[in-house]
Amino acid sequence: MLMLLLGLAPLAWAEQGEAARAWEDEPGVVGELARQAASDGARIQDFYARRDYRPAWQDADTVAAFTSALHTLESDGLHPQDYRPDELRNRHRAVYDYGSDVEAQAQYDLFATRQLLTALDHLQRGKVDPEALDTGWEVPVSPPDFSLAAVSGAVDQQRFEALIGEVRPDFVPYQRLRSGLARYRNIEKLGGWPRLPEREQALRPGDVDEDVPLLRERLAVIGELELLIADNDIFPGGEFEAPDPRRYDASLEAAVKRFQRQHLLDPDGIVGRQTLAALNVPVERRIDQIRLNMERARWLLHGLPASFVLVDIAGYRLSYYRPDGQIWRSRIVVGRPYRRTPSLRSEITHLTVNPTWTIPPTIKREDVLPKVRQDLGYLWRERIQVLSPSGAPLDPWEIDWGSPGNIVLRQAPGPQNALGQLVIRFPNEHMVYLHDTPAQNLFSREQRAFSSGCIRVQNIRELGQLLLDDTDSGHDVERRVENDETQNVRLAHRMPIIIHYWTVNPGDDGELSFRPDIYERDDALLRALDRPLTL
């Protein structure tokens, strides 16, 4: 992204105050603008101080160019009307065509500048405050980093579309989402896609059914154009017969499987209840889904380091962007909807090899104690120790398991440990981490929200070794696992980690994958994004 950083440091507050006072006795709009800007906030005053308090919006052509450029924000999923284009034009006419006084002219200038800076802020860092939606939000959103001097110059030159292009997030995932938004809006203009009727029986490859042509048309709308013509069959004897459009053929099966993979459904080619529901999501809903994930991208895709670990909660995927430019990816298991994996940003500090597991209070109360009350042998089978708060061993037979009091349950290290044989740790308020698991079978599922909040990683030993290698830490994970001792292995340099929630993912081929909203976060974000802005 071309950052609008021109090396012009902001005026110190004292200097700004002196500049404002210097204009106090200036007659006309300049002096009035200086007086009002001084009480309108630091950024507004800084903007005008850089201009020596010259008005920015006296020219009607400047206002017209700005309001026209505002409409380009639709391509970013924002609402241009939030930034008052109609009011900008109408107030300008009222102020300048009818000879308003200098105070009204100054107020209009400040109003227009606020709209411009707000639009640029929202484009670069998002309109919605994520902390207002999620009290557990732990990903800092940096303030906008464009230069006010450059903004002032763009106003004078009426370069608003270029300015918007320079401020817009310049990251490949965002660009792909933006392209996808344009594509799906075009589908909407062309009438969307057909809705398939509800069915009692699943539609399977080889079936001949009246709904097959509609299924073929539905998938053709999103790019499976070859589906408009069914497979040709050459019958014995060399005679050609036109294909039956009602037959669920091989090309349609392949397209259904692609659709299922893009929506994290079991790619079996069978149009059952879940696949039918995904097919019947209207295009308008998909457009909204793209828009709100662009908002999430604006929160997140800034200030990214060259190398980091990215955890995609709703996509059940971890990506490690290595210092050499390679990307290591793996499947993950995340928290159940009632034990959600949080969004956060931190730094990986160390690994724990052959960890013990001190069972957290919630899991102890809701999961473990009910099993122990039914069968005390559960403790021995799972190698769980009973300890006092100070760590002293207790006799399980002497515990009143109906009311056990303040005891600690700790699982011994080993392959059966709930954390497996490796944990990757990073400081955070939620006490979550990446870890191994004995339940490797869960990684074969398409939707994998089964944990109690922490993140299980397939092939985590490989990830651990890469982290050690890439930070020059000089340790061998496999050798340390094999000696059976519980050890902490520190990284020589911390590795950033970002855990975030995406319900639309742009693939390397530009195709969008839509994921189930497992934590039901989309609707609240969409309401906030669509809420009219009040300034």
Image: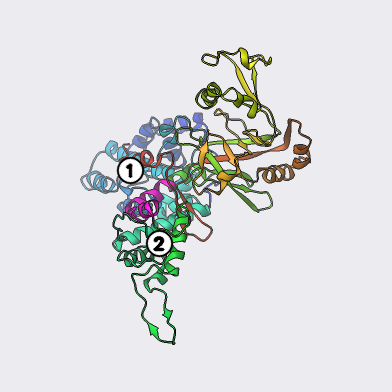
Instruction: Look at the image and give the residue range highlighted in magenta.
Output: 272-293
Q: Main secondary structure of the magenta part?
A: helix
User: Which residue was labeled with disc 1?
Assistant: 530
- The amino acid pointed to by label 1 is Asp
Separation of marks 2 and 1 at Cα, in angstroms: 40 Å
Quarter of the rendering containing residue 358: top right
Q: Nearer the viewer, residue 433 or 61?
A: 433
Q: Is residue 94 visible?
A: yes
Q: Nearer the viewer, residue 508 or 109?
A: 508
Provide residue 1's location: percent of width, then percent of height: 53, 52
Whichever of callouts 2 and 1 sits on the residue coming sooner in the sequence is 2
SS state under label 2: loop
Quarter of the rendering containing residue 221: bottom left
The stretch drawn in magenta includes residue 280:
yes
Q: Is residue 304 visible?
A: no
Provide residue 112's location: percent of width, then percent of height: 34, 43
Q: Which mark is residue 204?
A: 2
Mark 1 is surrounded, within 10 Å at the Cα level, by few (under 14), some (14 to 19) or many (20 or more) other residues, namely some
Provide residue 10's location: percent of width, then percent of height: 52, 37
Provide residue 167's location: percent of width, then percent of height: 47, 49
Q: Nearer the viewer, residue 230 or 236?
A: 236
- The amino acid pointed to by label 2 is Arg
